[in-house]
Image (tube, rainbow, N blue to C red):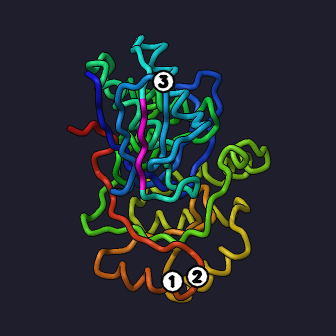
């Protein structure tokens, strides 16, 4: 096949803990989060040289995508070169799992182009390995593979890590307030940050499993960011202002922004509150995705 397309939802993590392992298939994170109806579509086509684009612009580096290409070639032997077009409306580097979504959608598209020599989870595991190799994510690909509102109960790649999907209503919507990006590799590489998130995140997983509600998830996520020392003063002030309006808004992991979950009829009023409190921020909403990463016709 000369062309293929695939989609991966974006993903938001509420809280997590890091689990180190020398085998990248077991290295990753546990925690909880949800997948978005917004995400990344990757189109793959034959080319004279490997060329990677994001929303039409050529990416000179693109280390995660190049890592996926290399791992897939090493595993399957699929020849190239390829032109890879990633397209997303989500803010990049702001805690929406765009790196993992690009990796996952590329791995699934490559597998389809090769005639599906790998199972879906095998292909997805290559995307996880690429994220671990480059240092851009820990559990995002696992969550994006299965979609929905999930608790990651065992760390690792799809096929190795384990996920429990929690129930949620079809009209649940996510609301976002985003000032800009944070450097995920720098955050994950900071030993103090790693120790703090692992310490605070480890006990929360069972709390959510014992009481698997959206309100509990938001409360635990808010507490996690604050107790781990991740929330900057500007975000903390906004959290306090929103709390006075009965809105629980945890910090994006990792992005300079906040999120909350609401029922569809109240989404616009919450977004209006976000705009009034932070006029310089990007404010938007999204539905949740139940299917996870998938190939497209």
| CB contact under 8 Å: marks 3 and 1 | no
Q: Which residue is mark 1?
A: 275
Tag 3 secondary structure: loop
Magenta segment range? 83-88
Residue at image position (57%, 37%) is: 62
Residue 50 showing in the rendered view: yes
Report how far apart the C-alphas of labels 1 and 2 lie in the structure: 5 Å
Residue 87 belongs to the span the image colors magenta: yes
Q: Which residue is mark 2?
A: 278
Residue 237 placement (x, y as % from top left): 67, 81
For the C terminus, the quadrant is top left
Position of 267 with respect to 115 (left or right) is right
Density class for disc 3 (Cα within 10 Å; few <14, some 14-19, many ≥20) is: few
Residue 49 badge: 3
Q: Nearer the viewer, mark 2 or mark 3?
A: 3
Q: Quadrant of residue 267?
A: bottom left
Pick the front one: 142 or 133: 133
Position of 250 with respect to 200 (left or right) is left
Residue 153 showing in the rendered view: no
Density class for disc 2 (Cα within 10 Å; few <14, some 14-19, many ≥20) is: some
Q: Quick check: 297 above or below 261?
A: above
């Amino acid at each position: 096949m000369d062309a293929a397309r695939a989609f991966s939802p974006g993903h938001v993590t509420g809280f997590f803990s890091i689990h180190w392992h020398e085998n990248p298939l077991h290295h990753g994170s546990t925690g909880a989060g949800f997948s978005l109806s917004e995400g990344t579509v990757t189109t793959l086509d034959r080319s004279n040289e490997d060329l990677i684009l994001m929303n039409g612009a050529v990416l000179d580096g693109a280390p995660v995508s190049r890592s996926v290409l290399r791992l897939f070639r090493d595993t399957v032997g699929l020849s190239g070169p390829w032109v890879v077009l990633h397209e997303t409306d989500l803010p990049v580097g702001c805690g929406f799992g765009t790196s993992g979504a690009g990796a996952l959608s590329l791995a699934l598209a490559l597998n389809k182009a090769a005639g599906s020599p790998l199972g879906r989870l095998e292909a997805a595991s290559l995307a996880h390995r690429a994220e671990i190799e480059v240092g851009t994510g820990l559990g995002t690909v696992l969550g994006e593979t299965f979609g929905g509102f999930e608790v990651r109960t065992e760390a690792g790649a799809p096929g190795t890590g384990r996920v429990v999907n929690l129930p949620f209503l079809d009209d649940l919507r996510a609301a976002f307030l985003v000032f800009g990006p944070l450097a995920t590799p720098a955050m994950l590489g900071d030993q103090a940050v790693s120790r703090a998130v692992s310490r605070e995140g480890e006990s929360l997983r069972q709390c959510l499993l014992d009481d698997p509600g959206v309100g509990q998830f938001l409360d635990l996520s808010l507490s996690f960011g604050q107790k781990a020392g991740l929330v900057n003063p500007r975000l903390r002030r906004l959290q306090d202002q929103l709390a006075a309006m009965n809105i629980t808004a945890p910090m994006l992991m990792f992005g300079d922004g906040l999120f909350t979950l609401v029922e569809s009829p109240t989404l616009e009023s919450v977004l209006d509150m976000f705009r009034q409190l932070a006029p310089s921020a990007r404010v938007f909403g999204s539905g949740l995705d139940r299917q996870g990463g998938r190939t497209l016709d």
